[in-house]
Amino acid sequence: MLTQPVFVTQPYLPPLEEFIPYLQSIWDNKILTNGGAFHQQLEQALRSHLGVEQVALFSNGTLGLITALQALRVTGDVITTPYSFVATSHSLLWHGNRPVFVDVEPHTLNMDPARIEAAITPQTTAILAVHCYGNPCDVQAIQKIADNYNLRVIYDACHAFGVEDEGGSILRHGDLSVLSFHATKVFNTFEGGAIVCPDAKTKQRIDHLKNFGFVDEVTVVAPGINGKMSEVNAAFGLLQLKHMDTVMRRRAEVDAVYRAQLADVPGLQILPKGNQTVSNHSYFPVLVTPEFKVSRDALYEHLKVNGVNARRYFYPLISDFPMYRGLPSAGRDNLPVAARAADQVLCLPIYPALTAEQQQRVVDLIKSA
Ligand SMILES: *Cc1c(COP(=O)(O)O)cnc(C)c1O
């Protein structure tokens, strides 16, 4: 019997016919980009959906990260995590900053505030932290350090769409937060992203920077980039937003089934939930410890040959890539918790269209490894 392959993630696509009227409107108006009607509508819709002050849309999250650094005029060294997608550190290199890697905490795999403080030097100007898997960083501790040492704080919140703590959206923390709307993320616009910022003045500067630095027809104030989101992407975002309740509900159900079914598997460690009050269930990471029957990579292969695509996310560590491994902070002895997580982590399939049968197959394969 042939069975359909199971993916690690699959984008949520609303029915195609629902998208046609949006396309018709674009065809009628002939405005394809540069802050058209859908772009403005999506910014407003996200402000209210997320409960944040200001949103500046981008063509992807990586350009959002680079522009966030430019908007805050970040110079010199930036303290960051090796346990993330490579775009986190790449944004620093693109902006001419030196990454300084610090280790993560074992239970959240987010940057350890005590390590941040120990890594500060006179060259340090900012902290670039990641809400890994959508679990919030220790935002209070990080802000306290930033205030004491006069550092800027940027959150790579690419995993954290819709996540809330007691005070509301976690995107309100730090100076700026950056989202990704890539096809693999919880909320997608095919490609896309956004910077969340606290005030209209900052948003205006960001809007100039994402449009080559143009302030008006004849005035360019900075070497800005082309980071604009197109009308097709913005329109798709508006449509996708209408379906987010369904998406979140299905993800929560998948998450709950894994937690129940895998709780007692010897040697398999489910990463505990963070201190958020609203989760987005963006990933389902497990740690395959040495007490498990087989190695992480053997389990990964076992799933793969049986049509289940899990993902070693994040592996390798960013600090092990050639453009980073020569940095003084990149040694594995400086980053033991992150290094162990990279060697043990496996993210299991989680997405709205994953069926109960498919999920059972994933569970059964893990148990039979
Ligand atoms: C997806 C992701 C990015 C990059 O976002 P793009 O929209 O693909 O450019 C950056 N950081 C993290 C943590 C991500 O998961």
Image (cartoon, rainbow, N blue to C red):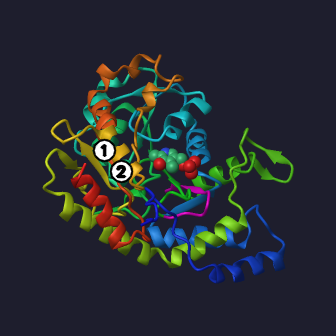
Verify CB contact (< 8 Å) between mark 1 and mark 2: yes
**257 versus 286 height, above or below:** below
Quick one: SS at disc 2?
helix
| Residue corresponding to mark 1 | 299
Start-end of magenta stretch: 187-198
Is there any visible trace of residue 27 in the rendered image?
A: yes
Q: Residue at x 32, y 59 (%)?
A: 362
Q: Residue at x 58, y 45 (%)?
A: 62
**26 versus 81 height, above or below:** below
Task: Please state if 192 lies on the left or on the right of 244 as rendered.
Answer: right
Compare residues 240 and 53 and report the one nearer the observer: 240
| Residue corresponding to mark 2 | 303
* Image coords of residue 163 (percent x, y): 37, 62
Disc 2 marks a residue whose amino acid type is Leu
Disc 1 marks a residue whose amino acid type is Leu
Residue 41's image quarter? bottom right
Magenta segment includes 197: yes
Magenta segment includes 36: no
